[in-house]
Structures are given as C-alpha cells and as structure tokens.
Amino acid sequence: MGSIEPENDARLRLDQAMNDRRLSLRMKWHEVAEKAKISVPTLKRVRTGPGSITDWAARGLEEALEWPQGEVARILAADETPAEQGEEEAPRYSDPGLQAIWEAPGLSEAEKQAAITLIEAMRSVSAPQAQGRGWGQRTDRAG
C-alpha cells in the first residue's frame, strides 16, 4: 500500500479543503473519521502532520467527504483542475431529501438553498417537540 508525504503548504491546503467540505456537509470531525473508517488521531495527523498519508486514509476521506477518487492527491499537488473534469462543483448533502432538493430541475440556486434552509430550520425546531411521540400523533386524546 502506498502513501503520500505532503509538504507543509500542501498539508495546510488539504486541511482547509477538508474543513470547508466538512462544514458544507454539516459534519463534525469525529463523524468524518468514523465515515472514513479511520481514528480521530489519524484524522488529526492527516490534517496537521507529521508523517505521510496512506492511500487507505486518503480513499476513506474522499468517501467520507463525498469527494471523487484522487481528490486528496490533487489538493496536495496543488492541481487546480478538479479530479472529475467537466463536472460542476455543487454542494452535496448527506441527507438524501436535501440532496434531491439540490438536484431538482427548474429551481434556481437561490430557491434550492432557501428550501433547504427552511427544512433544516423546521427540523431543528420540530425535533425537540417530537421527542417521546410519533409524528402526527395527537396528545389531546379524549379518554
């Protein structure tokens, strides 16, 4: 199994790109590590050094961050062309419903973002109220 030995500038680029992507996917670092099937200390070492990055860790991070294969190496090499050329960079959501909204035809980017923001806001307000009972259940049942 191979590995990549990044320079300091390359490591900083990778850390920034990973952080930006993690935030766009609304993930915490421990969730990235879990999805990448690497430990949190390994993730920290990949982000800040020292040492090389194994192919296993790079592939796991690409999968966790929903990047195309080869993206970690591309970022470390300071290559400005995306790993999958010709494909427009678009946000990806780990929630299939939000992703479906983002990919819906006939809506502007602003409309898609507004719909996603509204759904996320509704979920954050509704979730605590829904604890302990199923959605759509009434609490004022006559006995």
Image (spheres, grey):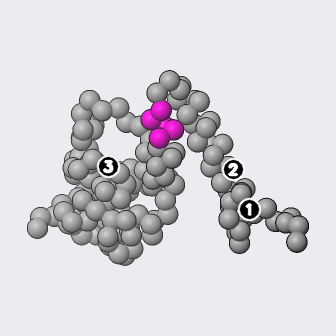
Q: Tell whether 35 sits left or right of 127.
A: left
Residue interval drawn in magenta: 100-104
Which part of the image, by quadrant, shows the C terminus?
A: bottom right
Q: Where residue 43 sits in the image (x, y, percent)?
A: 35, 68
Mark 2, other Cα within 10 Å: few <14 / some 14–19 / many ≥20: few
* Earlier residue among tags 2 and 3: 3
Which kind of residue does numbered mark 2 sit on? Met
* Earlier residue among tags 3 and 1: 3
Residue 137: numbered disc: 1
Q: Where residue 68 sits in the image (x, y, percent)?
A: 27, 47
Reply yes or no: does residue 64 show up in magenta. Answer: no
* Earlier residue among tags 1 and 2: 2
Q: Report the magenta stretch's main SS.
A: helix
98 over 1 or under it: above or below: above
- Check disc 2 and report the residue beneath it: 122
| Towards the viewer: 117 or 15 | 117
Tags 2 and 3 in contact by the CB under 8 Å rule?
no
CA distance for labels 1 and 2? 18 Å
- Residue at image coords 66%, 42%: 118
Q: Nearer the viewer, mark 2 or mark 3?
A: 2
Which kind of residue does numbered mark 3 sit on? Trp
